[in-house]
């Protein structure tokens, strides 16, 4: 195959050429509470002497690269609610799973309440329950939690540490070539022993992250939450959920990460809050047209008695996007909008109070030294004023089209400009948005100089292991940012996406591992910012979990037709030869770890220079140390069918990928690193190489 070139070094060689979603009713909700965490295992000792993977040619390197400090930023996002695509039902609030096959008015409450609180919740016995009431028999006694959730605080429980600041306020461009490591906190490391990961566990593993060589951490939601969507339903955006720790522990994490030259960014969820947020509880107690309800999107229903939802919108988790409330007098009331789960009511971004509160949140976390934010559903928030019906033929779970009226409305850009103005008060801070927008021109609008620093582009993660698909994804991603001089982003997986080993292997774990290793080199050779999802560096596959272990809201809301994303969220294996592999001192973890992961532990892979972990360490180090990885231009080479090759225009590093089942000749040059050993001097099947 020859692309945009005419010269091919030799027949079949890879070489350079001349560069060039029936309605639902719910009674006024009760308060859910949050629960503390238990205790857990110690940390894995990391031996810095362990070498990198075996390479062909190129410099010999050891350990992780030296990283550059992070920007100094202040304040944190003030938002509640969760990402369109995150997990459900947390154990510490005992939330029930939603039954998507039952009428919406029969869906059990998920807040784990005992019915003794101040928000007019009606709970009936099974013989007494009416159509708009919750059935007490549907709440399991062992899931009840009577503690009150913390309301959004005006004054922090713990003041920010004196002198807290971002890592390096003088470096305002660090994010342009950084390697971010996404931590899904409940699955990373449990130091408190309750089977759920926590902030103490992250602190305990900072030595490992330093050894890996990453620049920045991205923490999935850790704010106070009833955990209907594993943290993306925020009840208090300015405090830490006890499941994960407290503000003191968070401050310690910031300080220790900064001492290791690692920045810390965190999830910001501005599209919605939890239904247990003080604002939403006040809205349920208030009357239609009240200031309290004006913070959310409440509407009268259609039809003679208002029995029909205000429009036909579906939730991205399945089921209707509207839930009807029952007023205190027992009469059916208005409907509220939730693009995600019913426990995640959408905020009304036309109300100035909403951004004012978000600004308080931003500054709260930035003042503690947070280095930036990952903005969940960054293409959400703004809604069209007339709330027009959507095309239901295009409605899908966890997806949207560019013309979907639920997302990507132009008014969202003014919100991002306001967020950016706050971020700019903290030099060195940066934000990245989750943008599910396919059109390149519309995508680029989010990356204008006064909006987001970075935008997640998921094209590479959606491409199959096929040279044409991969090249198309790369070219499209580069074109998406070119018009605004933006920085491209690259990722192969995250907490919402099937892990690359499983995706590429199609049932063959060994093949999937080879291909995932090859794609690491492709990703790392490209200009821009790289995001690694925790466990990718270990070559972890998705796990086929038993039905009774599934917690993702998608499983219930889809009527058990979609298994959801739990398979890519299984806790990490650290050491030992049996579950929970050092993740926790608890024998049972929030999702079960398969016993087959013995050879995939951090401990085992650090001792194996051919392991996927060693390959990651070595690739990251080379990417930092070699000047050949400079420049923003990608020049494509001619390559055999099923292969691709490109060169960084300024630095000159060459990346060659063989996506076929046969070995092919390498391009000329000195080999720096290969994803698999060479085959008689040739690039092996399903592998990649770096050359200079």
Image: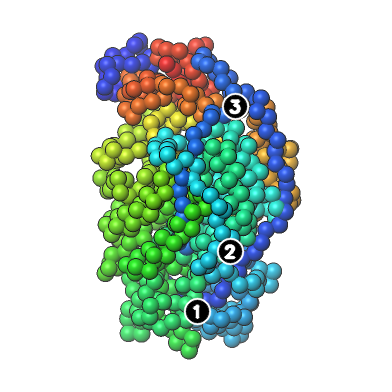
Q: Quadrant of the C terminus?
A: top left
Q: Callout 3: helix, strand or loop?
A: loop
Q: Which residue is mark 2?
A: 157
- Is residue 188 found left or right of 436 in the rendered image? right
Badge 3 density bin: few <14, some 14–19, many ≥20, Cα 10 Å: many
Which of the pair 142/19 is nearer the observer?
19
Q: Residue at x 62, y 83 (%)?
A: 125
Q: For residue 159, which quarter of the picture?
A: bottom right
* Disc number placed over residue 556 in the picture, else none: none
Q: Earlier in the sequence, mark 2 or mark 3?
A: 3
Q: Residue at x 34, y 69 (%)?
A: 351
Q: Callout 2: helix, strand or loop?
A: loop
Q: State whether residue 389 appears in this view.
A: no
Q: For residue 118, which quarter of the picture?
A: bottom right
Q: Residue at x 40, y 14 (%)?
A: 667
Cα distance in 3D space between marks 1 and 2: 29 Å
Which of the pair 532/12 is nearer the observer?
532
Cα distance in 3D space between marks 3 and 1: 56 Å
Q: Nearer the viewer, mark 3 or mark 1?
A: 3
Cα distance in 3D space between marks 2 and 3: 39 Å
Q: Is residue 8 above or below residue 535?
A: above
**Marks 1 and 2 in Cβ contact (< 8 Å):** no
Q: Earlier in the sequence, mark 1 or mark 2?
A: 1
Q: Residue at x 50, y 62 (%)?
A: 237
**Marks 3 and 1 in Cβ contact (< 8 Å):** no
Q: Is residue 467 above or below residue 436?
A: above
Q: Is residue 477 above or below residue 233?
A: above
Q: State whether residue 45 appears in this view.
A: yes
Residue 451 at what x, y percent from top left? 32, 50
Q: Which residue is mark 3?
A: 63
Badge 2 density bin: few <14, some 14–19, many ≥20, Cα 10 Å: few
Q: Callout 1: helix, strand or loop?
A: loop
């Amino acid at each position: 195959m020859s692309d945009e070139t005419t010269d091919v070094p030799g027949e079949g060689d890879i070489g350079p050429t001349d560069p060039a979603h029936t309605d639902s009713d719910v009674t006024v909700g009760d308060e859910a509470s949050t629960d503390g965490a238990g205790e857990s295992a110690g940390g894995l000792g990391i031996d810095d002497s362990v070498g990198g993977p075996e390479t062909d040619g190129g410099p010999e390197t050891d350990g992780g690269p030296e990283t550059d400090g992070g920007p100094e930023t202040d304040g944190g996002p003030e938002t509640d609610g969760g990402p369109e695509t995150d997990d459900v039902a947390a154990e510490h609030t005992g939330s029930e799973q939603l039954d998507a096959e039952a009428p919406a008015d029969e869906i059990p409450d998920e807040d784990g309440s005992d019915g003794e609180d101040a928000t007019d919740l009606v709970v009936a016995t099974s013989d007494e329950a009416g159509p708009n009431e919750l059935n007490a028999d549907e709440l399991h006694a062992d899931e009840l939690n009577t503690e009150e959730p913390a309301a959004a605080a005006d004054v922090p429980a713990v003041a920010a540490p004196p002198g807290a600041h971002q890592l390096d306020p003088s470096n305002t461009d660090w994010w342009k070539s950084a390697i971010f490591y996404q931590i899904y906190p409940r699955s990373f490391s449990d130091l408190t022993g309750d089977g759920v990961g926590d902030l103490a566990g992250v602190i305990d593993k900072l030595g490992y992250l330093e050894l890996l060589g990453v620049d920045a951490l991205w923490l999935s939601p850790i704010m106070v939450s009833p955990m209907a969507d594993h943290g993306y339903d925020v009840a208090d955006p300015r405090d830490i959920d006890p499941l994960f720790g407290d503000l003191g522990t968070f401050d310690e994490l910031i300080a220790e990460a900064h001492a290791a030259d690692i920045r810390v960014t965190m999830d910001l969820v501005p599209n919605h809050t939890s239904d247990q947020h003080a604002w939403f509880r006040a809205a349920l107690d208030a009357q239609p047209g009240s200031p309290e309800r004006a913070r959310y999107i409440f509407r009268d229903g259609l039809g003679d008695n208002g029995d029909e939802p205000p429009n036909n919108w579906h939730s991205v988790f399945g089921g209707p996007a509207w839930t009807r409330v029952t007023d205190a007098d027992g009469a059916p009331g208005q409907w509220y909008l939730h693009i995600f789960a019913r426990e995640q009511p959408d905020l009304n971004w036309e109300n100035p109070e909403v951004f004012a509160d978000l600004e308080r949140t931003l500054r709260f976390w930035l003042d503690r030294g947070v280095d930036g934010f990952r903005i969940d559903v960054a293409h959400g928030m703004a809604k069209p004023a007339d709330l027009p019906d959507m095309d239901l033929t295009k409605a899908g779970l966890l997806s949207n089209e560019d013309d979907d009226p639920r997302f990507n409305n132009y008014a969202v850009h003014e919100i991002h400009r306001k967020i950016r103005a706050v971020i700019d008060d903290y030099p060195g801070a940066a934000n990245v948005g989750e943008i599910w927008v396919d059109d390149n021109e519309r995508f680029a609008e989010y990356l204008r100089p006064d909006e987001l620093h970075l935008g997640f582009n998921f094209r590479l993660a959606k491409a199959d292991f096929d040279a044409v698909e991969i090249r198309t994804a790369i070219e499209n991603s580069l074109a998406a940012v070119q018009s605004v001089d933006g920085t491209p982003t690259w990722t192969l997986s995250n907490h919402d996406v099937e892990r690359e080993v499983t995706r590429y292997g199609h049932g063959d774990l060994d093949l999937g591992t080879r291909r995932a290793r090859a794609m690491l080199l492709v990703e790392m050779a490209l200009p821009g910012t790289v995001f690694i999802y925790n466990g990718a560096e270990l070559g972890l596959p998705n796990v086929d979990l038993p039905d009774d272990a599934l917690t993702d809201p998608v499983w219930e809301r889809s009527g058990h037709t979609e298994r959801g994303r739990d398979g890519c969220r299984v806790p990490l294996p650290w050491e030992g030869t049996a579950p929970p592999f050092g993740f926790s001192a608890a024998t049972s973890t929030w999702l079960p770890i398969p016993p087959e992961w013995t050879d995939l532990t951090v401990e085992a892979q650090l001792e194996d220079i051919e392991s996927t972990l060693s390959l990651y360490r070595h690739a990251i180090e080379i990417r930092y140390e070699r000047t050949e990885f400079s420049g923003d231009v990608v020049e494509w080479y001619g390559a055999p069918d099923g292969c691709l090759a490109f060169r960084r225009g300024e630095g000159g590093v060459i990346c060659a990928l063989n996506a076929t089942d046969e070995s092919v000749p390498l391009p000329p040059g000195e080999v720096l690193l290969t994803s698999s050993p060479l085959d008689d001097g040739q690039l092996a099947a399903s592998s990649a190489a770096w050359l200079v």
